[in-house]
């Protein structure tokens, strides 16, 4: 089974890929069954500009809407995320775990190892594409939905090639730097920025063509679902992927390999310099190890900084002036947008600044940003210390398991609040700069509810880590639960279904807090569930045997 | 069994300590004590149950039955209080790779309280540790030094150490052994789990040998060695008839060469000498004591009933 580097790379990842891709297939089936039951005439009055932007064909039908809803948003993120995770782990991952030495102790060149890892990435992308294609064919047959004129295969090809590009970007960055953090962080940043840019730039007068500079432009701009594969676009991304791989081969052969090295950060440099040593020592040295909470915070401060800055500048401040730039379009949309459609985003008027912020910032990005931070902190809090086997040393000190849990939970809460505050500050500033006149109280209310949703899923990660000590479980179950809950809630809103009340996201935007202000009842429900989950974590953690390995 | 001695009289006590993982009996009915002022060597091959015992003592895992106490306090219900008074060095030490050695020690010192930094600096100097580098960038031996310093730094009453010499060079090992002896000289205790038999032989007062989860020997090092098979060479004034050794309990492999006799013997010298001195003049006697390694191997080679 572990005959080659290639098979090992495939076997290391196949479970995660299978779960991700099958979840997407299941989501497609769910979306299709819901779209089948609603009145699609709500789409017929939408302006053409919007339809083309959203990739919805003018004669929108159930299949096209479902494919777009699931594959082009969640699908692109999931598949791109998998490719980036694989790509960044290719060489840099082996360096991080310190296994690169023993691997290259065998008669294998660096180039050959890199080729094997890249081939594994390509294979898993192809297999993922095949599964998504099959799901795209089987789902409409099960539900008896017409797919006439749909090129689902073409759409999946575009999806696969786009994801492969991001994966190869991560391979190249990992090969040149040897750092998984840089490889995955930069690639994911490029992917997210690309999604946002491709969504916004075509609407800004004079900037329409700038979207072509972003890889995600080639995912759906040619509308492959209707027009089939755009071989020019596919060839462009394919050639770029090959070029990145060639760069990776050059990079990995040029530099010294790291051996479980942790690298030198800016703070380390400042601590080493006699001029800045005293200040840096206080900030980065003694302060960050002053206690469990401070140390936990310092481990994730980079993530917190990036996410908070993204929420403040890109999703907050920038959206205000952008709304002014595209206000004409938005007003057109507003006149014809059906209420049912807007229900997806918690209601409101897209031509209003509140509605626009809801769609761009609060609908999807804010909960994701919050959950990235809360789940990362919470999952690594307990299960992470077991995975790295540091829990033994930590608990050799006179601190109880409950205290460790409480301090780490407190750090998660503080981090969630910081992201919430950054979002509030950014949106408030964006509204002020753009002269949009939004209610600061309502912005605050929405941010509070978003923070509570983020904390709820973080608390779930904390509970799972406390109860099992399994890092992967503590990460993937809350992420999966959040994904299903988010899609389910959007579908329930669209369908007017009552079962949406059982999903946390119902209590986030369900009351349209950006227009209506704080829904204290909703906030209380989210807070109560969060507190309950954290409370359950204490006995679960106190009772069990700790693992020696994650 | 009940605790009969006052709490502080015993550094560590286990009573019928047992840990099962499903059908796997990792530890079975372990009963032992470690006294103040004693280095207790805990010997056994890989997978014998040494680390399981230590993890039970540290409350990382909970015994299936039995109990353990340290300094008179229960290892589960009073584990936090216990940890104020002990130093712990786990096997295959894992530390936070992004922290420097100094950060690591500061972190644990903050959590522990009462750490005298001048003592930390003294320990650092003795072991030649590097505190300025990130732990992730240190060699395993230099990382182990950080582990040793943190175990000693709060002047604990009991040190629990699992394979502490891993990665340390011979000079540092010597210094570390001296530190352990100094520690017990000041009234402290050490529970030392090890494969390094020469080290245990050098520093331990008593040893426990564990096999497949069962304690199969528990004795002082000197008594264990005195009981063990030793090589004996006897020189007599006249040629010797080998039959004189017949029926002496513990005598094996007798080789007679004129005035000289070589044999293996497991017993007290008194019994052997009484027998031969009745028949011959003993001119000289040389014995070679078995070292711990031979004893250890004997326990594992022979099918000792467990």
Image: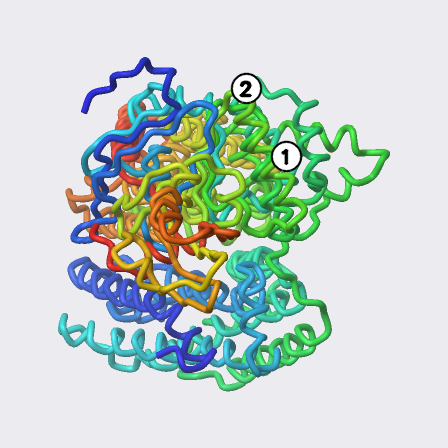
Residue where numbered disc 1 is placed: B103
Residue A479 appears at what percent x and percent y?
Answer: 35, 50
Residue A353, placed above or below residue B247:
above
Name the residue at 49% across, 30% down.
B87
Q: Nearer the viewer, residue B39 or B81?
A: B39
Q: What kind of element bears circle 2?
A: loop
- x and y, in percent, of residue A50 in the image: 43, 60
Left/right of residue A493 with respect to residue B138 in the rendered view: left
Secondary structure state at the residue bearing disc 1: helix
Towards the viewer: A8 or A236: A8
Q: Is residue B93 above or below residue B158?
A: below
Chain ID, mark 2 = B
First in residue order: circle 1 vs circle 2:
1
Q: Nearer the viewer, residue B266 or A13?
A: B266
At 25% from the left and 74% from the top, the residue drawn is: A135
Say which mark, if any, is on residue A15.
none
Indicate left or right for B152 with A257 as reference: left
């Amino acid at each position: 089974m572990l005959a080659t580097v290639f098979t090992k790379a495939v076997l290391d990842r196949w479970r995660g890929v299978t779960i991700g891709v099958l979840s997407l297939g299941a989501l497609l089936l769910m979306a299709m069954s819901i779209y089948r039951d609603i009145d699609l005439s709500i789409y017929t009055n939408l302006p053409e500009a919007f339809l083309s932007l959203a990739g919805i064909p003018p004669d929108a039908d159930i299949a096209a809407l479902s494919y777009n809803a699931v594959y082009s948003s969640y699908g692109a993120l999931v598949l791109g995320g998998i490719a980036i995770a694989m790509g960044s782990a290719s060489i840099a991952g082996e360096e991080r775990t310190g296994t690169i030495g023993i691997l290259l102790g065998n008669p294998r060149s660096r180039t050959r190892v890199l080729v094997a890892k890249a081939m594994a990435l390509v294979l898993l992308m192809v297999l993922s594409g095949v599964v998504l294609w099959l799901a795209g064919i089987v789902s409409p047959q099960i539900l008896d939905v017409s797919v006439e004129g749909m090129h689902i295969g073409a759409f999946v090809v575009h999806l696969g090639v786009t994801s492969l590009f991001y994966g190869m970007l991560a391979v190249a960055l990992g090969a040149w730097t040897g750092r998984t953090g840089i490889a995955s962080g930069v690639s994911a940043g490029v992917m997210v920025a690309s999604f946002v840019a491709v969504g916004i730039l075509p609407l800004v007068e004079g900037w329409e063509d700038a979207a072509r500079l972003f890889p995600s432009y080639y995912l759906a701009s040619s509308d492959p679902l209707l027009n089939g594969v755009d071989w020019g676009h596919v060839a462009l991304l394919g050639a770029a992927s090959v070029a990145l791989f060639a760069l990776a081969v050059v990079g990995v052969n040029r530099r010294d390999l790291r051996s479980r090295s942790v690298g030198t950060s800016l703070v380390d440099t400042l601590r080493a310099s006699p001029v800045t040593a005293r200040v840096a020592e206080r900030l980065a040295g003694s302060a960050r190890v002053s206690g469990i909470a401070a140390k936990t915070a310092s481990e994730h401060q980079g993530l917190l900084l990036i996410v908070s800055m993204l929420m403040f500048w890109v999703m907050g401040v920038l959206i205000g002036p952008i709304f002014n730039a595209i206000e004409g379009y938005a007003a057109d949309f507003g006149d014809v947008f059906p209420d049912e459609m807007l229900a997806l985003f918690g209601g409101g008027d897209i031509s209003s600044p509140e509605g626009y912020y809801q769609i761009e910032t609060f609908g999807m990005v804010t909960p994701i940003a919050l959950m990235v931070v809360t789940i990362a902190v919470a999952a690594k809090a307990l299960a992470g210390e077991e995975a790295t086997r540091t829990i033994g040393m930590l608990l050799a000190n006179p601190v109880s398991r409950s205290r460790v849990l409480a301090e780490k939970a407190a750090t998660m809460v503080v981090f969630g609040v910081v992201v919430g505050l950054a979002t509030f500050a950014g949106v408030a500033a964006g509204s002020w700069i753009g002269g949009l006149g939004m209610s600061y109280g309502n912005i605050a209310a929405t941010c509070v509810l978003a923070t509570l949703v983020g904390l709820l899923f973080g608390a779930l990660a904390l509970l799972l880590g406390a109860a099992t000590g399994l890092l992967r479980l503590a990460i993937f179950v809350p992420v999966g639960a959040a994904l299903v809950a988010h899609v389910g809630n959007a579908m329930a809103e669209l369908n007017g279904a009552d079962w949406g009340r059982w999903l946390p996201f119902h209590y986030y935007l369900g009351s349209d807090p950006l227009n209506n202000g704080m829904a204290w009842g909703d906030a209380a429900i989210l807070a109560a569930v969060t507190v309950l989950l954290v409370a359950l974590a204490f006995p679960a953690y106190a009772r069990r045997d700790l693992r020696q390995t994650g | 069994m009940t605790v009969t001695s006052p709490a502080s009289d015993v550094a560590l006590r286990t009573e019928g300590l047992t840990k099962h993982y499903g059908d796997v009996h990792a530890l079975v009915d372990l009963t032992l004590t470690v006294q103040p002022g004693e280095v207790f060597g805990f010997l056994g091959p890989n997978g014998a149950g040494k680390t399981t015992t230590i993890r039970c003592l540290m409350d990382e895992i909970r015994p299936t039955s039995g109990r353990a106490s340290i300094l008179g306090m229960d290892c589960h219900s009073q584990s936090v209080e216990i940890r104020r008074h002990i130093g712990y060095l786990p096997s295959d030490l894992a530390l936070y790779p992004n922290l420097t050695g100094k950060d690591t020690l500061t972190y644990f010192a903050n959590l522990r309280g009462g750490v005298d930094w001048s003592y930390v600096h003294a320990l650092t100097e003795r072991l030649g540790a590097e505190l300025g580098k990130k732990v992730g960038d240190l060699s395993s031996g230099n990382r182990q030094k950080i582990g040793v310093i943190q175990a000693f730094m709060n002047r604990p009453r009991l040190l629990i150490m699992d394979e502490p010499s891993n990665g340390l060079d011979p000079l540092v090992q010597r210094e570390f052994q001296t530190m352990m002896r100094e520690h017990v000289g000041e009234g402290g205790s050490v529970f030392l789990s090890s494969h390094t038999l020469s080290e245990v032989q050098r520093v331990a007062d008593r040893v426990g040998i564990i096999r497949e989860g069962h304690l199969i020997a528990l004795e002082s090092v000197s008594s264990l060695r005195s009981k063990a098979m030793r090589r004996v060479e006897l020189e007599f004034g006249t040629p010797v008839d080998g039959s004189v050794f017949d029926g002496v309990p513990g005598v094996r492999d007798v080789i007679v060469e004129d005035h000289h006799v070589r044999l293996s013997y497991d017993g007290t010298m008194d019994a052997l000498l009484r027998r031969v001195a009745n028949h011959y003049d003993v001119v000289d006697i040389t014995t070679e004591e078995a070292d711990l390694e031979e004893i250890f191997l004997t326990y594992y080679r022979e099918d000792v009933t467990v």
